[in-house]
Image (spheres, grey):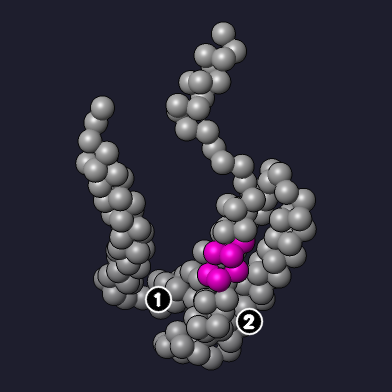
């Protein structure tokens, strides 16, 4: 039998590196686009970059709500579905409305600071993260425990 410490250490290291890699890759993409924008140094490219930066939080949250929405359809608990769907609709709607309001605000007065935009408001960001995390916890606690390989093996042997 293998050493469980090594096995789980590798797993924890991979999980840690994955969560470390996501923000690093996002930062690299933004830095690359920023560098490309400075290299090209033209008005349309700068405008495209600024519009993309404004739309990133709303795009991330609407994508997360859509993924959770599609996963919730297959969930076994009707109560969880009844609680989750209104939260998804509210969160998705707020993200889209804030994106539209930010784009209109940007087109009326182009500002270089993201603190004036609603999508970068701490309440918007933390509220969305809290809502997604609480829905994920609720769905995780109401999902049946997945059988591990030993239990599956015992079931197969019992059938034979």
* Real-space CA distance between mark 1 and mark 2, rounded to the nearest whole angstrom: 20 Å
Q: Is residue 127 above or below residue 4?
A: below
Q: Which sits earlier in the primary sequence, circle 1 or circle 2?
A: 1
Image quadrant holding the N terminus, namely: top left
Q: Is residue 4 part of the magenta span, yes or no? A: no
x%, y% of residue 26?
A: 36, 63
Q: Residue at x 36, y 76 (%)?
A: 42
Is 68 positioned to the left or the right of 30 in the image?
right
Find residue 111 and report its horizontal and vertical position in percent. Answer: 46, 89
Q: Would you place residue 70 above or below residue 20 in this image?
A: above
Q: Dividing the picture into quarters, in which one does residue 2 lie?
A: top left
Quick check: is 134 in the magenta stretch?
yes
Q: Main secondary structure of the magenta part?
A: helix
**Residue 68: where, in percent of width, then height?**
61, 54
Q: Quick one: SS at disc 1?
A: helix
Q: In the structure shown, which secondary structural element does the residue marked by tag 2 occupy?
A: helix
Say if residue 59 shows up in the picture.
no
Q: Which residue is mark 2?
A: 101
The quarter in which the C terminus is drawn is top right
The magenta stretch spans which residues? 129-135
Q: Position of residue 127 (x, y in %)?
A: 57, 76
Near mark 2 (Cα within 10 A), the count class, few <14, some 14-19 or many ≥20, is: some
Residue at 57% x, 59% y: name it. 137
In the picture, measured across the screen, residue 160 lies left or right of residue 14, that is: right
Q: Quick one: 62 or 1, which is closer to the camera?
A: 1
Q: For mark 1, what is the residue? A: 46
Report if residue 129 is visible in the image: yes
Does 144 sit left or right of 29 as displayed?
Answer: right
């Amino acid at each position: 039998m293998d050493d469980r410490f090594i096995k789980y250490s590798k797993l924890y290291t991979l999980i840690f590196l994955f969560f470390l890699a996501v923000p690093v890759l996002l930062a690299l993409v933004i830095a690359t686009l920023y560098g490309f924008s400075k290299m090209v140094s033209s008005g349309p490219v700068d405008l495209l970059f600024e519009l993309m930066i404004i739309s990133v939080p709303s795009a991330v949250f609407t994508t997360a709500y859509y993924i959770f929405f599609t996963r919730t359809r297959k969930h076994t608990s009707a109560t969880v579905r009844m609680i989750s769907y209104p939260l998804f609709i509210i969160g998705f709607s707020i993200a889209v409305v804030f994106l539209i309001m930010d784009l209109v605000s940007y087109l009326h007065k182009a500002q270089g600071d993201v603190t004036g935009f609603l999508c970068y408001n701490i309440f918007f960001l933390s509220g969305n993260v809290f809502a997604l995390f609480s829905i994920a916890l609720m769905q995780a606690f109401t999902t049946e425990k997945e059988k591990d390989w030993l239990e599956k093996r015992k079931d197969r042997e019992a059938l034979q």
